[in-house]
Image (cartoon, grey):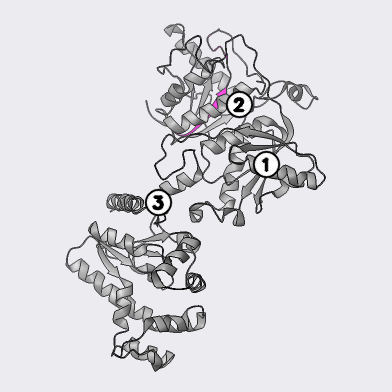
Amino acid sequence: MSMFSTGILVLTSPLHTLPLRIAPVLSSAAQLVERTLYVHLHPGLNLGSGSQPRPVFLPPAVDLSTLISRLYSNAADVCGHLDVRVLLTNVRTQSAACSGTAIPSCPFPTPQSLSHSPEVVLTDFPLQDPGQSHQVTQCLQRYTGHCYVCSPSLPAVLLHPQLVRLQENEEGLKEPGEEAEPMQTYSDVVVGGTFDRLHGAHRTLLNISCLLANRRLIICVCDHAMLKKKVLKELVEPYSLRAQRLQEFLQDIKPSLQVEIMPLEDPYGVSVVDPLLQCIVVSEETRRGGEAVNKKRIENGLPPLILHEIQLLKDAHHTETEEEKISSSSLRSRLLGTLLTPPKDTSHLAALPYVIGLTGGSGSGKSSVARQLEALGAVRIDCDKLGHEVYQPGTAACRRVLEEFGSDLLNEDNTINRRALGRKVFGNQERLKALTDIVWPEIALLVENRISQAREEGKQVCVLDAAVLQEAGWTDMVHEVWVTVIPEEEAVLRISQRDGLTTEDALRRLQSQWSNGKQVAHANVVLSTLWEPEVTQKQVLKAWNLLQKRM
């Protein structure tokens, strides 16, 4: 059967059996859906009775919350490529459903429009008789059309996963007759986080927050100062994009909620001043933050918030250098070495050799990455060495530098003392520009000569190792820009140890260069030497192998 971009999965199994059925059902669904999978919960729905069933309200229960966590955890394990969204339009407290005429008695008075139009509907409903297949699929189509905007002829598929045999006394499962424990809900709920590249743990947090909230959900999204200590903060998506994705996700899963998304630039945000808030959703990690919020609220004369704690989701695919939980940090680290943005138009360049422009701030490990690429077969063009060449006695650049900056820069052998020259220009933008206007064009000419030489020798790849690749405007000479990054504090430490500079001088050197964020904004591939050398080697090898496929 062909693949569909977007599907709806209608889960009909009784609530007490679903925990062990979710993984095989999701695995089966992932063989048919390749992008977005909406999950609609209707435990006990009978599609084979002969009469047309209607959607009903489900009460928020502790079991439902646990089930949602289990579902997103299983999804991360068995179909991590899918954008899974558990829909909660039909979940509402009895009091909310009956309080006032404005609240409809049916969850779907009109079909709900979803962000991604469904192309197929799937269900775990078990056929008692194979002859029922046509009747059940028709019933499923009509049921889905009553709930969501979709084509009347939406393809319907009955999944037949290898379900785990349920044992009567299976640990963690409730008996069918046991009454579900109700879940305390609140009018106004707040939750905070980075929400970078929405993953299963974010979705769990958001879904449970939506379960808890009857009227309004405030989402505080980390920005600016709150991102400063994040691992690979340069790869965090822009606030506007994260907010947009949150809005779309929440509009899908619970459109009745009043959602307010706002930037969080300190540890508290609106949570310590909004008098209507009743509950804050936290994880094991952020519970202390929730307690700090309550301390501030009390200081501000406001009642403390109920702390609703959710469990962290384990990441079954984490590596030795990644966190055991599902986290944005791990997802960002997996982007290292991959193509983040497609290369710009390079039709003005010869196809071969394919030129990689490798750059990065001082101390970022750029040159060690260049050497590793050289070992893999690339021709390395070291712009620092070419810089030495243009400073050689007798060259035009050497004469112009001495005229501009003084003959006191000369060593005893008539070469220019580049360290002394550096002290004259670093931190002084005007003097630095005067120097670069002299030497950068001369270095560019030497680079073009080296690339031409590599072409004549039949080389496939060149790596232009250049700290000022982007500042100098040399990106027009390369097919792709690769950037190495490390945190500023690590770079300062490395520079001080390597070059014998004070912390202040090392920081001044970094601040005279493009920031990591600015460099990454213009990069096709990003690498980081923050971890052990073996980790960097794996990144470089991944980047190299992916480059070979692109070429």
Classify mark 2: helix, strand or loop. Answer: helix
Q: Position of residue 242 (x, y in %)?
A: 57, 47
Q: Amino acid at mark 1?
A: Gly
Q: Position of residue 24 (x, y in %)?
A: 43, 22
Residue name at image x 51 percent, y 20 percent:
19
457 lies above or below 280: below
Asked whether residue 39 is drawn in magenta, I would say: yes
Question: Do we see residue 383 in this rendering?
Answer: yes
Tell me whether circle 3 and circle 1 mark residues in contact (CB < 8 Å). no
* Residue with the mark numbered 2: 65
Q: Quadrant of residue 14?
A: top right
Q: Residue furthest right?
A: 301
Given the image, on which type of amino acid does mark 3 rest?
Leu
Where residue 419 appears, as percent x and y from the top left, is 39, 80
Mark 3 vs 2: CB contact within 8 A: no
Cα distance between the residues tagged 3 and 2: 34 Å
Q: Is residue 510 left or right of residue 245?
A: left
Residue at position x 51%, y 79% from top?
Answer: 429
Front one among 491 and 252: 491
Q: Which residues are magenta?
A: 35-51
Read off the residue under disc 3.
336
Amino acid type assigned to the residue bearing label 2 in the image: Ser
Residue 308, above or below 389: above
Q: Which residue is mark 1?
A: 290
